[in-house]
Image (cartoon, rainbow, N blue to C red):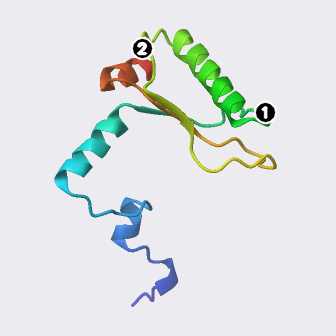
Amino acid sequence: MKRTNATNITPPAAKRSMAPKLDLDPITAALAEQERQRTLLFIGLPESIAARPSERVQEDREATTKILDHLEVEAEPTAIFRVGRFDSQRRTPRPLKVVMPTAAHQHIALGG
């Protein structure tokens, strides 16, 4: 009989998702899913080092506009923001979350 080291066994729940599960009422869950379907997440996009938050926000908006123009997406995002707290000493840029007006606009941006 073969012995199995218990530390090497991954429980099935851990394989599914590392994200925490939240108990959301059906309406909140539906709204969250609708926003997810309209969201683009830009990873690795250089982050401004401007001292003023308004200048950093403006640079993110300009970078997003350039990307969407290149992808030929004819829509203005409803929200653009960095995920996480600003730290001027950070070595890697924070992800940039871009929420589009519709899921169709997200689909176009993703090449659909």
Work out how far the residue at label 1 is from the one at label 2, CA to CA, in angstroms. 27 Å
Q: Residue furthest left?
A: 26
Q: Report the side of 6 relative to 70 (left or right).
A: left
- Where disc 1 sits, the SS reads loop
Q: Residue placed at 54% from the left, 10% from the top?
A: 69
Q: Amino acid at mark 1?
A: Ala
Q: Residue placed at 44% from the left, 20% from the top?
A: 109
Question: Mark 1 sits on what residue?
Answer: 50
* Image position, residue 60 (x, y; %): 63, 27
Front tag of 1 and 2: 1
Vertical relation: 1 (above or below) 66:
below
Q: Residues within 10 Å of mark 1 (few under 14, many from 20)?
A: few
- Where disc 2 sits, the SS reads loop
Q: Residue 16: name its quadrant.
A: bottom left
| The N terminus - image quarter | bottom left
Vertical relation: 51 (above or below) 71:
below
Q: Residues within 10 Å of mark 2 (few under 14, many from 20)?
A: some
Q: Amino acid at mark 2?
A: Ala
Vertical relation: 83 (above or below) 61:
below
The one of 77 and 94 positioned closer to us in this rendering: 77
* Image position, residue 26 (x, y; %): 18, 53
* Image position, residue 44 (x, y; %): 66, 36
Q: Which mark is residue 3?
A: none
Question: Mark 2 sits on what residue?
Answer: 75
* Image position, residue 76 (x, y; %): 45, 17
Q: Residue 101: name its quadrant.
A: top left
Q: Residue placed at 60% from the left, 49% from the top?
A: 84
N-term-proximal mark, 1 vs 2:
1
- Label tally: 2
Q: Report the side of 76 relative to 33 (left or right).
A: right
